[in-house]
Image (spheres, rainbow, N blue to C red):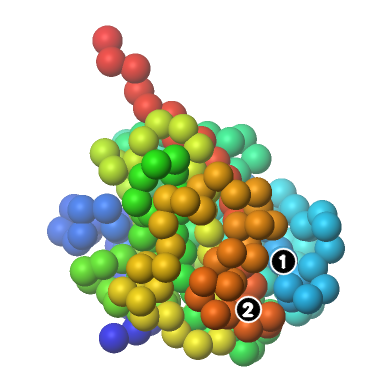
Amino acid sequence: METVLEHASAPAERESLAPVRGWVTAMATAALVLVVVQPWSTQPEDELRARGTAEERIAEGLVGMGVSGVPSGGGAEYEVIASKRVAAGDYLRFSYSNERNELGHLFVFALQERKTPHWYAPMPPYENRSAVIGHGTGETLPFEIEIGDSHAAGRLRIVAVFSEASLEFDSTASRLGPDLFGLADEALIEEVRSRLNLSTSAVIQVLETQVEKAVAP
């Protein structure tokens, strides 16, 4: 069953759903960093990094994902990529822009040193295939991911895979492991493409932040 990104509950219902996922319907309004990526075969050495809302400065034909932090106790969103920090206990909120109609599926996971990957979209056992996305700019994904106990302090490398075909979770996850963590961005992108047998049209994006754990008194 594919994850269709259309039906969502309000953030207040977060506690009644999966422990690390809350559903949102509002568009992200706080500033965040959005990285847009050209098709793999023509991607420049330096990616275009635009700071601002997800609606800004999106070139035709490009795709990309933005990430912001949502405080667990309420309050304004904050950007987590340029600042290289997200607080433990807070939530990650994702947005995307997709100007290429053929890329209708999104698979998102994160890597930490010597840890099994964190699965963000789809999130087992509730979902078992890539999220279905549409053509649009600044679209907010209808879920949040808690930076909970499964996340260690330190680097968090978030990988987004925009693909033509839906990726089934079990077969995809079996090919992705902690050995990917230490690769440089370009090497990581090439390795994920190879392991998942993705076409050159698929777009793979790597974003990085730092998990900050609270110091015990």
x and y percentages locating residue 207 in the rendered image: 59, 51
Q: Which mark is residue 6?
A: none
Q: Which sits in the foreground, 137 or 156?
A: 156
Tell me the SS state at disc 2. loop
Please name the residue shown 70% across and 64% down the image: 36
The residue where tag 1 is placed is 37
Q: As shown in the figure, which amino acid type bears the numbered disc 1?
A: Val
Residue 17: percent from the left, percent from the top?
19, 61
| Residue 180 appears in the figure | yes
| Disc nearer the start of the sequence (1/2) | 1
**SS type, badge 1:** strand
Query: Residue 188 in the image: x percent, y percent?
Result: 60, 57
Most extreme residue toward the left, as rendered?
Answer: 16
Can residue 70 be seen in the rendering of this structure?
A: no
Residue matched to label 2: 202
- Relative side of 122 to 188, left or right: left
Q: Residues within 10 Å of mark 2 (few under 14, many from 20)?
A: some
Q: Amino acid at mark 2?
A: Ala
Q: CA distance from mark 1 to mark 2?
A: 11 Å
Q: Is residue 52 left or right of residue 168?
A: right
Q: Residue at x 50, y 37 (%)?
A: 155
Residue at 78% from the left image edge and 57% from the top image edge = 48
Q: Quadrant of residue 162?
A: bottom right
- Within 10 angstroms of label 1, few (less than 14), some, or many (20 or more) residues? many
Q: Are marks 1 and 2 in contact (CB under 8 Å)?
A: no
Question: Looking at the figure, which quarter contains the N terminus?
Answer: bottom left
Measured as percent of width and height from the top left, residue 84 is found at 58, 36
Location of residue 90 (image quadrant): top left
Q: Nearer the viewer, mark 1 or mark 2?
A: 2
